[in-house]
Amino acid sequence: MKTTEKKPWTEARIRAFITSVLRAGSRRWPPKYETLNQAKTEKKTNPKTGRIAQHFRCEMCQEEFTQKDMEVDHITPVVDPIKGFESWDKFIDRLFCEANNLQAICKSCHKEKTKQEKAIRNGNRPKN
């Protein structure tokens, strides 16, 4: 019989696991629903499916999208792009924020905003 000894989790793996669990839980955070509800416009035909669907206005580009194409975004990033991860307390406070720090934006605008934040973060990494 072969016995395999399990390797202990690295600090990075633990952080990734905890981050994933917290982000999954934040999907049901009530201010996120409030933010999305405030972005509602009207029910109209979805051009992709031809069915009637609720539409929402993107805070950034002002276009209208169905819920599938919308995201609720933190105006102030959960992880500061300049300072990076600071502490679990700050991460949790920023993740579970009030609706005044959230905005409903389309997936395209969210992708662009995330790209810009990542560029700032990468520009502030120490050079080896």
Image: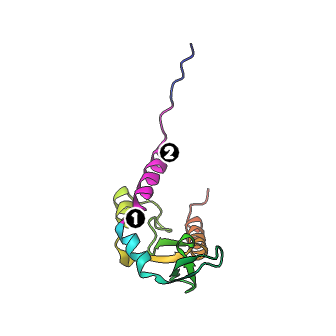
Q: Amino acid at mark 1?
A: Leu
Q: Separation of disc 1 and disc 2 at Cα?
A: 20 Å
Of residue 122 and residue 54, the one placed in the foreground of this image is 54
- How far from the left and from the top, in percent, is residue 52? 56, 78
Determine whether the residue tagged by mark 2 lies in a helix, strand or loop: helix
Of residue 53 and residue 41, the one placed in the foreground of this image is 53
Q: Earlier in the sequence, mark 1 or mark 2?
A: 2
Determine the residue positioned at 37% across, 65% down: 29
Q: Residues within 10 Å of mark 1 (few under 14, many from 20)?
A: many
Determine whether the residue tagged by mark 1 lies in a helix, strand or loop: helix
Q: Amino acid at mark 2?
A: Arg
Q: Which residues are magenta?
A: 7-29
- What secondary structure characterizes most of the magenta part? helix
Q: Which mark is residue 95?
A: 1
Image vertical order of residue 125 relative to residue 69, above or below: above
Residue 34 belongs to magenta span: no
Kindly identify which residue carries mark 2. 13
Determine the residue positioned at 51% across, 71% down: 71
- How far from the left and from the top, in percent, is residue 85? 45, 59
